[in-house]
Every structure is written in structure tokens, then in C-alpha cells.
Amino acid sequence: MASKEVPRPKEYAETGFSTVQPTLKQHLDNATAALLFKNFDACIEHCENGLSQVKLCTDRENFSSKEFTEQLCVLAVQAHAERNTWQEVLPFVQKVYGDIEHSPAAIVQLCLLLFAKLQDYPQCQALANIWLRNRDNYTDAEYPHIVDIYVQRVMFPWKLHSLVPAFLDTCLGLDATQRQLMMQDYAVVIEKEIKTSTNEDDDKSPLPVKRLPISESDEGESEGVWAYIRRLSALLFRRIQPYNLTAILSVAFIILAFLSLRFNKGPLSRIQSTVLLLWQRII
């Protein structure tokens, strides 16, 4: 049984190819106007309709779909960005071109700028790595511009200045002269950022530990307190028979008072007054 041929739309079957390009041009003009007047939904709709017609014309002679496809795709990406549906951008581009690595440089530039503005640097990194490492893109005239956008809009804000030389070495679409010129342009920014980072690290280093004074000087405190204890102990043993329980308890109390002074940082005069008062009561 013979397969039934699917009829083509009347505008193609009856009027022929001559009306196709004006129709695509009309979709392109309408999408551009809708974007300018901030009617983003209409812009995306015109782009999708135009892209559908481009697919129907790929088998026609003397017709290049690349220009129409790229222009319609750029308008659609801009419309998605303007209406804050940026999460639909990559699926849309992949639907049109199959994958990112085969997308035109203009589309990749637009996507990089969009995600860089959103500060989605990992997404930018993935896009750049996929496109820049595709051998088919090495000879693209916009290859150096893609590299420059990624360095200045992604690596610099992401504080990856020190990795720029190594990144340029991985961009095989650049020749030695292009790498050298780029590094000369970036050198001032990289040097300034690395110097700033070093100064910030120095500022974050721990400060030297300083001994804080307790009440008197560090050298004189111990000597002064122990001198006071010796004088008070001698007085006790002159007033009370040595080895008397009262004397032993008094001396012990004085030592406890000294320890309290050392660890609780209490005023020396208050401790002295308390000890003298209690000692007078004991004896």
C-alpha cells in the first residue's frame, strides 16, 4: 500500500517559493517591533512561527536559513531575558540548534552576557567551555571576542584573576599573538586584584597576643603581694604562738585571699581590708 503524501500548506503549493522570504521577513520585522514595544510574548511567538517556516524551506535552492535563524533566535533570547524567563533560554537555543557548541557566536555571546548579569557564573563557565573547545569554532572570527567576554564578565567578577593565563592557554582558537595581546590588556587588572587579595589576607592574620595588666604591673604585682603576705605572716607569728591552730588558719586564709586576687582580679585594697578584719576577729 502506497504511503499517502502529506500535503504542503497552500501558500507553498500554490504560490511557490517567491512568497516564503517575504513571509519570513515579515515575521522578523514583527518580532523586532514587538520587542521594541515590550510586547515580549508576541515577540517570542513571531520568532517561533518564523523558525518553523525556516525549517520548511531548508530544501529550497538559493536559500540560506542561517541568517534568518540567527536573527530570530537572538530576538527570542532577548525577549525571554526581558520578561525574566531566563531559565527558558538554553532549552530554546538547544531546540533551535541542537546543542550549544554548534550555536552561532552571537547566540553564545548573548547567553554569556545574560547569565553573567544574573551572576550565574557556573552556567557561564559551562557554556564557554563547551563552545570554545569545539574545533569547528576555532576559526570563527568571533572566537577571541567570546574569550574576552568570558574573562572580563565572568572570571574577573568571580575573582579568578590568577587563572586567566592558564585559561587562555586552553583556548586553542587563539594564536600566540592573540594570547599575548590579551594578557597585556589584562595584566594591570590581574596584578591589582592579586595585590588586593594579598593585602586582605595580611589584614586577616591573627594579631599578636598582648598581656593585659591585672591591677599593678606584671613584674611588681607578685612581688608586692608576696611581700605583704610575708609581713602579715611575720606579724601573726609574733602575736600568736607558732604552730597555734589560729595562726595556721590565718596564714591559710591569707594565701586563699592572694589566690582570689590572682584569678578573680579583685582590688588588692579590698582583699587586704577583709583579711585584716577577719584576722583581728580571730585573734
Image (cartoon, grey):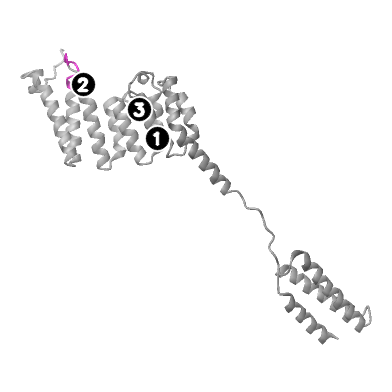
Mark 1: which secondary structure?
helix
Where is the C terminus found, in terms of image quarters? bottom right
Q: Is residue 61 magenta?
A: yes
Q: For the residue marked with disc 2, what is the amino acid?
A: Ser
- Mark 2 vs mark 3: in front: 3
Q: From this view, report whether residue 62 is shown above or below residue 89.
A: above
Q: Quadrant of residue 77?
A: top left
Q: Which residues are magenta?
A: 55-62
Q: For the residue marked with disc 1, what is the amino acid?
A: Gln
* Label located before the other in sequence (1 or 3): 3
Q: Residue at x 32, y 33 (%)?
A: 111
Mark 3: which secondary structure?
helix
Estimate the spatial distance between the alpha carbons at disc 1 and disc 2, rounded to whole Å: 32 Å
Q: Mark 3 Cα within 10 Å, few/some/many (few <14, many 20+)? A: few
Q: Is residue 240 left or right of residue 273?
A: right
Estimate the spatial distance between the alpha carbons at disc 2 and disc 3, rounded to whole Å: 24 Å
Instruction: Using the rendered image of the protein, determine whether residue 128 is visible from the camera's viewpoint.
Output: yes
Q: Main secondary structure of the magenta part?
A: loop
Residue at the spot of label 3: 145
Residue at the spot of label 2: 65
The answer to whether mark 1 and mark 2 are in CB contact below 8 A is: no
Estimate the spatial distance between the alpha carbons at disc 1 and disc 3, rounded to whole Å: 11 Å
Instruction: Using the rendered image of the protein, determine whether residue 122 is visible from the camera's viewpoint.
Output: no
Residue 34's spot in the image, x, y percent? Answer: 16, 38
Residue at the spot of label 1: 152
Q: Is 176 in front, or is 135? A: 176
Q: Residue at x 74, y 66 (%)?
A: 217
Residue 167's spot in the image, x, y percent? Answer: 46, 28
Q: Quadrant of residue 219?
A: bottom right
* Label located before the other in sequence (1 or 2): 2
